[in-house]
Amino acid sequence: MAFAKISDAELLYQWDGPAGAPVVVFSNSLGTTHRMWDPQVEAFSRDFRVLRYDSRGHGQSSVTPGPYNIEQLAGDVVQLLDELKVERANFCGLSIGGMVGMYLGANAAARFPRIALCNTAAKIGSADTWNARITTVQQGGTKAIAGGVIDRWLTAAYRSLHMGEAARVLEMLESTDAAGYVATCAAVRDMDFREKLQTIQAPTLIIAGTHDLSTTPADGRFLESQIRGAKYAELAAAHLSNIEARDDFNRTVLGFLKTQGAHG
């Protein structure tokens, strides 16, 4: 792991996989770190140079003053690639990471040959819902919302069979800096990309979870209907499909990235 200096922050990042291979960037969800992508590293690093990072306000990256916005968080990705001298990279983001991917697909498609938007939506929740969550975290930290969030992240069946993995995810959430979490909540609250989806030019894969209550299959189908040429896949999972349905997730995303032209 190392740190990259961007305009007003430092981002922790980690490389895996062979140098010289095509790059794929993974962008984490709200309340997690680059470690949420641990289930992907082995499978993806056989053919790709895997770049993971802690989003601004998360993990060991800088917690700069909020509120944040999606344009800013997408700019972080571009600056990170610039700092690492990566001209082009595939992109895979989940939840807010997917929102970042939408912005990049619309505004920096030349840098991103292929984009996977996972368990995400062009608009997630209502302003009232996000403001209530912001208030709760400001008063009690991320532990105050962790129980309800983990229930939506992973199905009860998965949590009962994989208690260690569920505990690892919960620990990521509970250790997220409250100020960074609140600032990032504002970015999700304020993004509405529904009228801009048709401007996404990069080839796009959409992944939804059958049991995802936060970003539903209907949200994923809407993305598919609005993004030209988008591919859609639905996995038997809740919100963190990359963890709950890791094998299907890996197979689906790798299949998309390996199609002709993805390595450009």
Image (spheres, helix red, strand yellow):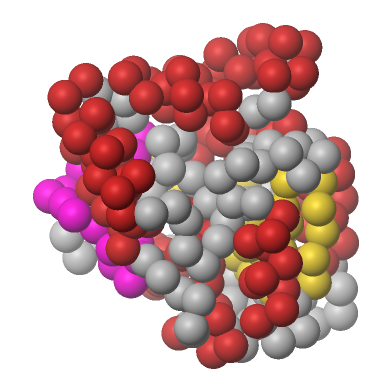
Q: Is residue 175 left or right of residue 233?
A: left
Q: Residue furthest left?
A: 65
Which residues are drawn in magenta? 56-73
Task: Find out whether residue 82 is within the magenta segment.
Answer: no
Residue at the (87%, 50%) spot, across then down: 251
Residue at the (46%, 74%) spot, across then down: 193
Front in this rendered view, residue 149 or 45: 149
Task: Find out whether residue 62 is within the magenta segment.
Answer: yes
In the rendered image, residue 154, in percent from the top left (x then y), is placed at 65, 28
User: Where does the C terminus fall, quadrant-wise?
Assistant: bottom right
Q: Is residue 70 left or right of residue 7?
A: right
Residue 15 shows in this picture: no
**Above or below: residue 203 compared with residue 69:** below
In the rendered image, residue 111, in percent from the top left (x then y), is placed at 54, 81
User: Where does the N terminus fall, quadrant-wise?
Assistant: top left
Residue at the (58%, 56%) spot, across then down: 120
Residue at the (69%, 60%) spot, across then down: 218
| Magenta part, dominant SS | loop
How many numbered circles are shown? 0
Front in this rendered view, residue 4 or 92: 92
Q: Is residue 249 left or right of residue 94?
A: right
Front in this rendered view, residue 200 or 211: 211
Q: Residue 190 falls in which quadrant of the image?
A: bottom left
In the rendered image, residue 252, in percent from the top left (x then y), is placed at 84, 55
In the rendered image, residue 258, in percent from the top left (x then y), is placed at 84, 67
**Above or below: residue 168 compared with residue 227:** above
Residue 219 shows in this picture: yes
